[in-house]
Image (tube, rainbow, N blue to C red):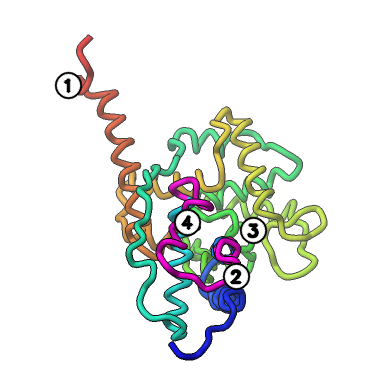
Amino acid sequence: MDRKSPPLGELIEDFVKTLEAQKSPHTVRSYASDLSQFSKATEGELRLDPATMRTYLRKYGPKPTTRARKLASLKAFTKYLRQRGEIEGDPTEHLEAPIRRRLLPKAISQHQAEQLLDQPFVGDAPLRDKAVLELAYSAGLRAAEIVSVSLSEFDFNEMSLHVTGKGNKERVVLFGERCRQAIEDYDKNERIRPVVGDALFTNAKGRPISTRTVQNVIKRWARAAGLPEDVSPHTLRHSFATHLLDGGADLKTVQQLLGHENLSTTQVYTHVSIERLRGAVEKAHPKSKKDV
């Protein structure tokens, strides 16, 4: 094109601003970091030739997962530049994503979930922590969703909750009687009223708890229940989805409850359920056992 493009740094800044209304804060930070590294690699010049981009990916993406994410950042950025009319064609067209081994999500068993939730209270804010655990497992919420949920978003008659998830996407999730009871007990007997807003989960100063607090709560309760050390908020979310499928829920329903944009993201849980079924068959069926 005849006209001169703005500096690379300015283009990246404009691109990141457009992402803020579309993606989660975590994704925006990742894209901004990747493109800042790309700018450093090209010394601030808009060089989008394949050789330059491959050099960048090799240098800053030592692991396949990291390299794949940085390539995704480049693809999103160059798509933005095409839409602006800064470049023509797709300079990333011939860049191949590294092969990534997709790890199955970890999930605890239904028996382990009962161990976690049925144990005696743990910690200095036991009613709050119990409500956090119930909501994480009963509704499959992310840690960030748990800390941002407001009491006014609950409908205790319908046993439902309005959630704003990744990319400001809204959805409705459902929860059970135990979860309702845990939240009401906490609200009535232990909750510190928020100094600002209507956050459900607050600390001793009435401020919303952090995602780190949610992680620590779940790890502390998991340790007390004798569960693996790596149990996390995401573990309970994975367990929620896996146990729904084990119980006969259809994939589209689970997709909606999890807030996944693409069904392919949810389909990984079918593999988890199949592996669990295979394990049960191999353990119990006489024809599945190896001869000894």
Per the picture, the main secondary structure of the magenta-coloured stretch is helix
Identify residue type, mark 3: Val
Query: Residue type at mark 1?
Result: Lys
Q: Earlier in the sequence, mark 3 or mark 4?
A: 4
Secondary structure under the numbered disc 2 in the rendered image? loop
Residue 279: percent from left, percent from top: 31, 30
Name of the residue lying farthest toward the left: 287
**Above/below status of 269 relative to 47:** above
Image coords of residue 268 (percent x, y): 34, 49
User: In the image, what residue occupies the spot 26% across and 25% down?
Assistant: 282
Regarding mark 4 in the picture, which secondary structure is present there?
Answer: helix
Mark 4 — residue? 55
Looking at the rendering, in which quadrant would you find the N terminus? bottom left
Q: Label 2: which residue?
A: 44
Cα–Cα gap, marks 3 and 4: 40 Å
Amino acid beneath label 4: Thr
- The residues bearing labels 3 and 2 have C-alpha atoms spaced at a distance of 38 Å
Q: Which residue is mark 1?
A: 287
Which type of secondary structure does the marked residue at label 3 adopt? helix
For numbered disc 1, what is the local secondary structure? helix
Measured in 3D between alpha carbons, the distance from the residue under mark 1 to the one under mark 2, in whole angstroms, is 65 Å
Q: Of discs 1 and 4, which sits in the foreground?
A: 4
